[in-house]
Image (spheres, rainbow, N blue to C red):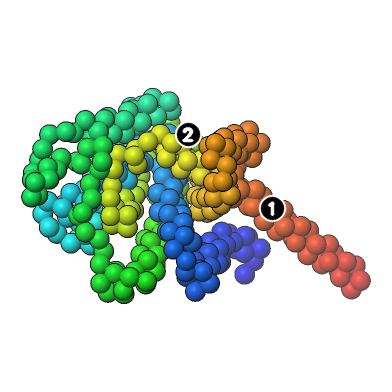
Amino acid sequence: MNGAGFIRMTPIRRDIAIGLFFLAIAIAIPFIDSSRSTMTQVILLFIWASIVTQWNLVFGVAGIFSLAQMAVFTMGGYTAAMLSLYMGWSLWLTSFLGAFMAVLVSGIIGAATIRLRGAYVALLTIGFAVVMQVLILTDSDCFFYRGVTCYNFTGGSSGLSQFGDFGFRDWLGYKQSLVGKYYLALFLLVLGTIFALVIMRGPFGYAFRALRDNANCASSQGINRVKYQILVFALSGFFTGLSGAFYAGHYKTIGPTMLDLSVLLLLLSMMVVGGLGRAWGPLLGCIILMFIDDQLKVYAEWRTVGTGAITILFIIVFRQGVAGLIEQLWERLLALRGARTAGASATNDKATG
């Protein structure tokens, strides 16, 4: 293989190596520490990473300043919970129905932002999430009775519960049920990550980045901005909605707190710290910020301040994020290796001559 071919293959090989490295660690964690606190924390990390990985396609790769990702996530969770609660369907089935509803909603949001740019997209998408939260919180009418208990359609401020779960306790027993949910969360993250990498490294990814960098130039080359903008919203919506359904099934509840601004900002910080538009930025950002947040939990009053300070530092000083810094170091190592190889070849030529 010539030098150009080697460099061209490097990102793919790097993705495979990094993916296998993280996967091996994730698979091994339950064998090393299966305590409830560790498992619960890592499951939450998998959920956040699944959301941020898909959000990175919209925000980082396509360059669309959307803040509706948690609304899409919540839509998937609520759809799965409602169908299980009101129709009595299995949560395994309703999770996929929730994912498809999330795709529909995400596509509608994408279509609504076609003529908008920058801050206007942010305002519209955050407005959608706020309206959704208000509608849930103000839902006080009785939808149906179970015994003497009155249930609201959305559960109101208390959210929905008692809609079932994935049945791991019946299959694996109480002690191993959390392990089953752990590996299911890991499976969803792996699928979502592979999907995102295929999109980013394929033709769709090039089209999204072209529209992000220069929409007019991309349009002149035949890239339909309307088509691709709706497409990137819809594609990211499926796994985001599926993560919302898993969240509901794992915690056995879903509520309007998922639409709080603090949750949105935490996930946005993960994407910024990890590296916007970078293949492994979302996962790295989630790991780093969740570790820092866990270390600061004993200082409750400083948790938000600490997260905010780190995010500001990366915005000002390390705009490419952790993944960008690692990529720069990798490129320098490749350049240094190439220079040494060239120098050694020149020395050999002189010695031969």
Residue visible at 29% across and 69% down? 168
Spatial CA span between label 1 and label 2: 28 Å
Q: Is residue 282 above or below residue 33?
A: above
Instruction: Determine whether the residue tagged by mark 1 lies in a helix, strand or loop.
Output: helix
Residue visible at 51% across and 69% down? 33
For mark 2, does the 10 Å Cα neighbourhood hold few (<14), some (14 to 19), or many (20 or more) residues?
Answer: few
Q: Amino acid at mark 2?
A: Asn
Q: Position of residue 264 (x, y in %)?
A: 42, 38
Q: Is residue 36 above or below residue 240?
A: below
Q: Report the side of 324 relative to 155 (left or right).
A: right
Nearest to the observer: residue 103 or residue 285? 285
Q: Position of residue 266 (x, y in %)?
A: 47, 41
Residue visible at 18% across and 49% down? 82
Q: Position of residue 24 (x, y in %)?
A: 52, 70
Residue 66 visible in the displayed image: no
For mark 1, does the 10 Å Cα neighbourhood hold few (<14), some (14 to 19), or many (20 or more) residues?
Answer: few
Q: Amino acid at mark 1?
A: Leu
The residue pinned by badge 2 equals 214
- The circle drawn on residue 329 is 1
The quarter of the picture where the C terminus appears is: bottom right
Give the quadrant of residue 8.
bottom right
Nearest to the observer: residue 226 or residue 54? 54
Instruction: Determine whether the residue tagged by mark 2 lies in a helix, strand or loop.
Output: loop
Nearest to the observer: residue 245 or residue 117? 245
- The circle drawn on residue 279 is none
The quarter of the picture where the N terminus appears is: bottom right
Residue furthest front in the image: 148
Residue visible at 25% across and 33% down? 137
Q: Report the side of 350 relative to 139 (left or right).
A: right
